[in-house]
């Protein structure tokens, strides 16, 4: 009932919760993916004025999310200390430190956590507010001139079904991609650390043959990027995630 009420309030409160397309653009840094307008995904650099305006808009939204969290969390949900992150999967899985690994389209600014089967529960590493959620991926890969291409909705063409979580205690962003259809949370939901967000899937660009069975997990903090202060900057969360995984293993003994 609490989650349903929060979702209804969030849908009505468009000043606090923008569309997921807008949220993705505010989340990205120097380049903006022009999806889903066409099959070919192209990147257009943002101007300095667009970056500055985006930072101002995002900071105003963050103030609203912090107030929203304080109004609704009460004593039942508290912010998560840095040394108490929850491992984002219900099983140990295969955790790789592949942050910044080279890719055809640039460095991989996230971690990939591989599982042996899809459907493994994805958990919130910290308590916070869901600020974007996409659960209507309808894409897929098809062979065409030049190789495979894909199209669809969801959180983005790359993410497929996914979730973006804002930590009101730190101002950090946690981003989960490639989930199965049937995400457990919606924009405006308050979640506790360890709460289920959805399940590992193979949507977005992970739907390409041979690219499934993993959770794409990204972590961002405000910093200096593109010569603009306050732009969200990708940070390697491997130390925190590895520590959380070790706590999970010790607890299972």
Image: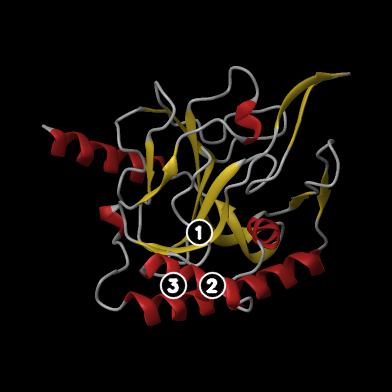
Residue that badge 1 annotates: 186
Choose top left, top right, bottom left or bottom right for residue 212.
Answer: top right
Q: Is residue 68 left or right of residue 33?
A: left
Across and down, in percent, residue 127 comes to 35, 61
Q: Element at badge 2? A: helix
The quadrant in which the N terminus is found is bottom left
* C-alpha distance separating marks 1 and 3: 11 Å
Q: CA distance from mark 1 to mark 2?
A: 9 Å
Residue contact at pointers 1 and 2, CB within 8 angstroms: yes
* Mark with earlier residue (1, 2): 2
By what rule are the colours in the image chosen?
Answer: secondary structure
Judge from the rendering whether residue 24 lies leftward or rightward of residue 246; answer left or right: right
| Furthest residue in direction left, as rendered | 253
Residue beneath disc 3: 5
Which residue: 59% across, 17% down?
Answer: 210
Q: Position of residue 128 (x, y in %)?
A: 40, 64
Of tags 1 and 3, the one toward the viewer is 3
Q: Please tell me which residue is depicted at 29% across the width and 69% down the height of the picture.
A: 78
Q: Is residue 155 above or below residue 147?
A: below
Residue 173 picture location, percent across and down: 50, 57
Task: Find the distance from the CA under tag 2 to the CA under tag 3.
Answer: 9 Å
Vertical arrangement, residue 142 with respect to residue 52, above or below: above
Tell me which residue sits at (64%, 69%) in the image: 18
Instruction: Answer left or right for 124 relative to 84.
Output: right
As drawn, the label of residue 10 is 2
Q: Earlier in the sequence, mark 1 or mark 3?
A: 3
Tell which residue pokes out farthest to the front in this image: 1
Circle 1 — which element?
loop
């Amino acid at each position: 009932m609490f989650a349903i009420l929060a979702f209804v309030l969030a849908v009505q409160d468009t000043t606090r919760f923008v569309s997921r397309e807008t949220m993705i653009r505010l989340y990205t840094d120097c380049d903006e993916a022009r999806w889903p307008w066409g099959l070919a995904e192209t990147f257009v650099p943002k101007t300095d004025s667009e970056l500055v305006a985006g930072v101002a808009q995002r900071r105003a939204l963050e103030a609203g999310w912090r107030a929203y969290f304080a109004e609704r969390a009460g004593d039942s949900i508290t912010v998560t200390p840095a040394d108490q992150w929850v491992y984002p999967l219900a099983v140990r899985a295969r955790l790789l430190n592949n942050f910044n690994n080279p890719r055809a389209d640039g460095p991989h600014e996230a971690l990939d956590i591989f599982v042996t089967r899809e459907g493994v529960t994805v958990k919130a590493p910290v308590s916070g507010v869901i600020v974007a959620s996409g659960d209507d991926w309808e894409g897929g890969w098809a062979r065409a001139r030049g190789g495979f291409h894909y199209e669809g909705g969801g959180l983005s063409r790359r993410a497929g079904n996914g979730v973006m979580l804002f930590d009101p205690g730190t101002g950090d962003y946690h981003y989960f991609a490639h989930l199965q259809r049937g995400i457990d949370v919606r924009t405006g939901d308050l979640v506790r650390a360890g709460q289920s967000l959805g399940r590992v899937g193979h949507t977005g660009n992970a739907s390409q043959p041979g690219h499934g069975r993993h959770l794409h997990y990204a972590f961002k903090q405000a910093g200096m990027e593109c010569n603009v202060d306050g732009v969200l900057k990708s940070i390697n969360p491997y130390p925190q995630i590895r520590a959380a995984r070790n706590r999970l293993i010790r607890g299972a003994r």
